[in-house]
Amino acid sequence: MSALDAALRSAWSVMSLVMPMAPLQSTLA
């Protein structure tokens, strides 16, 4: 279960990093 938890955490961190970048790119472009 710890492996699943690590995968969920990495996925959440990637999402939190990518989600704010999408509106920024659309605003700059």
Image (spheres, rainbow, N blue to C red):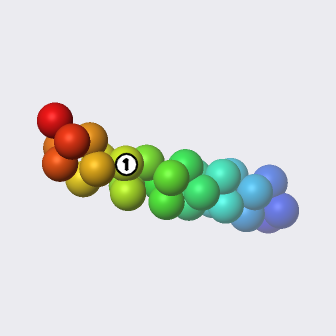
- Does the rendering let one see residue 4? no
Q: Residue at x 67, y 61 (%)?
A: 9
- Give the image location of residue 10, x and y in percent: 66, 52
In this view, 28 is above or below 3: above
Q: Residue at x 50, y 52 (%)?
A: 17
Pick the quarter of the image with the N terminus: bottom right
Q: Determine whether the residue tagged by mark 1 lies in a helix, strand or loop.
A: helix
Q: Quadrant of residue 8?
A: bottom right
Q: Quadrant of residue 6?
A: bottom right
- Does the rendering let one see residue 21? yes
- Give the image location of residue 11, x and y in percent: 57, 52
18 vs 25, left or right, is right
Q: Residues within 10 Å of mark 1 (few under 14, many from 20)?
A: few
- Give the image location of residue 15, x and y in percent: 47, 54
Between residue 6 and residue 1, name the one nearer to us. Answer: 6
Q: Residue at x 28, y 50 (%)?
A: 24
9 vs 18, left or right, is right
Q: Quadrant of residue 3?
A: bottom right
Residue type for callout 1:
Met
Between residue 14 and residue 27, name the one nearer to us. Answer: 27
- Give the image location of residue 18, x and y in percent: 43, 48
In this view, 13 is above or below 28: below
The residue identified by callout 1 is 21
Between residue 26 and residue 14, name the one nearer to us. Answer: 26
Pick the quarter of the image with the C terminus: top left
15 vs 6, left or right, is left
15 vs 2, left or right, is left
